[in-house]
Image (cartoon, coloured by chain):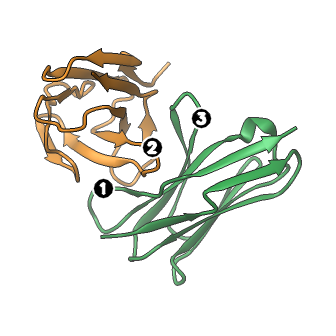
Chain colours: A orange, B green
Amino acid sequence: DGGITQSPKYLFRKEGQNVTLSCEQNLNHDAMYWYRQDPGQGLRLIYYSQIVNDFQKGDIAEGYSVSREKKESFPLTVTSAQKNPTAFYLCASSIDRDTYAFFGQGTRLTVV
Amino acid sequence: KNEVEQSPQNLTAQEGEFITINCSYSVGISALHWLQQHPGGGIVSLFMLSSGKKKHGRLIATINIQEKHSSLHITASHPRDSAVYICAVRGGSNYKLTFGKGTLLTVNP
């Protein structure tokens, strides 16, 4: 079955450590996105990629990095420079900007 | 920047009731999305529309471009409809969506 997979579902890290969140899709979608969700706030765009080997900053890219070396994969690294990394992170993909987005199940990151 | 406001923030209904969730935005858009988020966190896209009305099962989404307003209706609501419903808009030709804060719907049996 086609879909988008995020792993792990829960992640705990110590403050000061970098951590990479995985996002894989087998939908053959060109566009992929990373969002952050905090309680009481709408989803906010961290990074997006329109095509392989290309990505653009979203509204809250500081402290995060991404890569898009393969069409199916769009990993997000939360660096130690991110001041408040504890959040729920959602990955999504779509054929292009004019189509539905498919979302993963999310990764809940807790930094202690 | 587009501002997206949803109302109500919380909604409790009895099974079988007709539900309406509203979404208003401040700047012209090219598309509006309705999404559903279940307690586990996963999100499902329900509708994407730029004009008129769409229907899928018991769900109906409408949009009024002139009034910058959209509504999501649920007919014959059921406890399994309990979720957070999120409105998101895209302006212009870019890939960015601006999201509302969501409406928490609880349907009691």
Count neighbours of disc 2 (C-alpha within 10 A) and say few if under 14, some if 14 to 19, many if 20 or more. Answer: few
Give the alpha-carbon distance from disc 3 to disc 1, as whole Å.
Answer: 23 Å
Q: Where is residue B100 in the image (x, y as percent from the top left)?
A: 47, 58
Q: Residue at x 51, y 32 (%)?
A: B41
Kindly identify which numbered label has been placed on residue B38: 3
Which mark identifies residue A39? Answer: 2
Residue type indicated by callout 1? Lys
**Residue found farthest to the front:** A112
Q: Which amino acid does the dot numbered 2 rest on?
A: Pro
Residue B62 image offset from top left, x and y in percent: 63, 67
Element class at badge 1: loop
First of labels 3, 1 by sequence position: 3
Mark 1 vs mark 2: in front: 2
Task: Give above or below for A46 relative to B64.
Answer: above
Q: Which of A40 and A76 is in front in this view?
A: A40
From what the image shows, is residue B51 above or below residue B11?
Answer: below
Q: In which quarter of the image is the C terminus of chain B?
A: top right
Mark 1–mark 2 CB contact (< 8 Å): no
What is the chain letter for disc 1? B
Q: Do callouts 1 and 2 point to residues on the same chain?
A: no
- Residue at 19 percent across and 29 percent down: it is A78
User: What is the quadrant of the N terminus of chain B in the image?
Assistant: bottom left
- Whether residue A67 is situated above or below residue B58 in the rendered picture: above
Q: Which of marks 3 and 1 is in front?
A: 3
Chain of the residue under the numbered disc 3 shown in the image: B
Residue B96: give its label: 1
**Total label count?**
3
